[in-house]
Amino acid sequence: MVAVMSRIKTEEQADAYKTALAQYDRATQHLKDVSEDIIEYMRYPRREFAVNFPVRRDNGMVEVFTGYRVHHNTVLGPSKGGIRYSPHVTLDEVRALAMWMTWKCALVNLPYGGAKGGVVVNPQELSQGELERLTRRYASELIPLINPQMDIPAPDMGTNSQVMAWIMDTYSMTMGYSVPAVVTGKPIPIGGSEGRTEATGRGVIICMMEALKQHGEVDADKISVAIQGFGNVGSNAARYAQEMGFKVVAVSDITGGIYNPNGLDIPAVIEHARATGSVQNFPEAENITNSELLTVECDVLIPAAMENQITAANAHEVRARYVIEGANGPTTPEADDILNDHGVFLVPDVLANAGGVIVSYFEWVQDLQSFFWDQDEVYRQLRRIMVKAYDFTLATAEKYKLDMRTAAQVGAIERVAAAIKMRGFYP
């Protein structure tokens, strides 16, 4: 008997691509020197791949799963982007994430284009053996698309370093020799990089500190921070923020959140979440919902969970003065307008959460050279690139008199468009 994994399509996932295109259209209105044919060309993914593949479950039953991989643009180099396992994965969502990856890589000046992949599956419902069989079969389907010079996957929602190890091994067994550079986000013993796990969250806080410094706010102990999402990005952002002296007053995960206006002990919250499976019911904190976290009294709000969390319905209730986007696409275009009207300073996702792809780039470079850096070098180079990208975005905003999101898109799109113009259209 063969079962088929149900395809769940939510309004949020359907809207992700519309959001990406709306942001693109807003940005390209300011690019008077870019031809219409190049603007039209960049709207579309270069290639889209969909596959239905069988996986044998532990009970002997074969179930068919659907997977995707989208390459949005490869003009600057091989495409780069994560693979997510979620029951909510859709082709539209993957298209949006691939497009955002193109702009993110261009913005931070990496020699990459944008890609994204995903499988429609709830990984929590699979045993370890089932997860490995699913990953290896999906990886085998991707072999025509991935290699160190063409497309380099990485972890994303629902995947981790172990999943990357299985993909790398599957590819290597097919090639007949080890190819560590085919994926990033691997365990360190098989070619992973120091600092990769902490990179995205750490980069979010680097951008937050640059934004605060830009506005003359240099006393960390006077700044309160709320973080929606307590996975890899949110928890590492919270940990680094507290290490730098900031007061983290609220965090949340999929089960809900906690709030203490006097600040939370983040290492203790991490341990509590590890032990109980939730941040909720943490001692000396009030339980709140994920939606309530977005509107708590704080100086900085970091949405680090899912797309479309700050919308026209709740943006007017946001009380933070700064929004630093740790997630991909957490704010809709309509919410952008509301936040801008309210004087909220927003650092967009393509800049704020670029730390992950930056250290993925470091890992790829180290794998290709078989020469590895220590953690201090990784963090030094991460900060250098993040600050340079922040300054570039700010300069673009001032040049065109734009908000930071539109400026980030304009700056990134300009770089991709210039490369297309130089290379020309083949044949």
Image: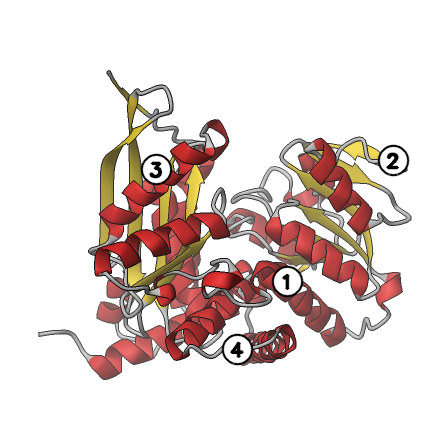
Circles 2 and 4: CB atoms closer than 8 Å: no
Q: Distance of mark 1 from mark 4, alpha carbons?
A: 20 Å
* Residue farthest toward the bottom in the current orientation of the protein: 422
Give the x, y percent position of residue 102. 38, 64
Q: Which tag, 1 or 3, sits closer to the chain's start?
A: 3
Residue that badge 4 annotates = 396
Earlier-in-chain disc, 2 versus 4:
2
| Position in image of residue 41 (x %, y %) | 24, 64
Circle 1 sits on which residue? Answer: 204
Task: Check disc 3 and report the residue beneath it.
Answer: 133
Numbered disc in front, either 1 or 3? 3
- The residue carrying pointer 3 sits among few (fewer than 14), some (14 to 19) or many (20 or more) residues within 10 Å by Cα, namely some
Residue sitting at x 22%, y 81%: 423
User: Cα distance, mark 2 to mark 4?
Assistant: 45 Å
Q: CA distance from mark 4 to mark 3?
A: 47 Å
Q: Determine whether 224 is above or below 54 in the image.
A: below
Residue 283's tag is 2
Q: Position of residue 147 (x, y in %)?
A: 28, 63
Q: Amino acid at mark 2?
A: Pro
Of mark 4 and mark 3, the one earlier in the sequence is: 3
> Does residue 342 appear in this view?
no
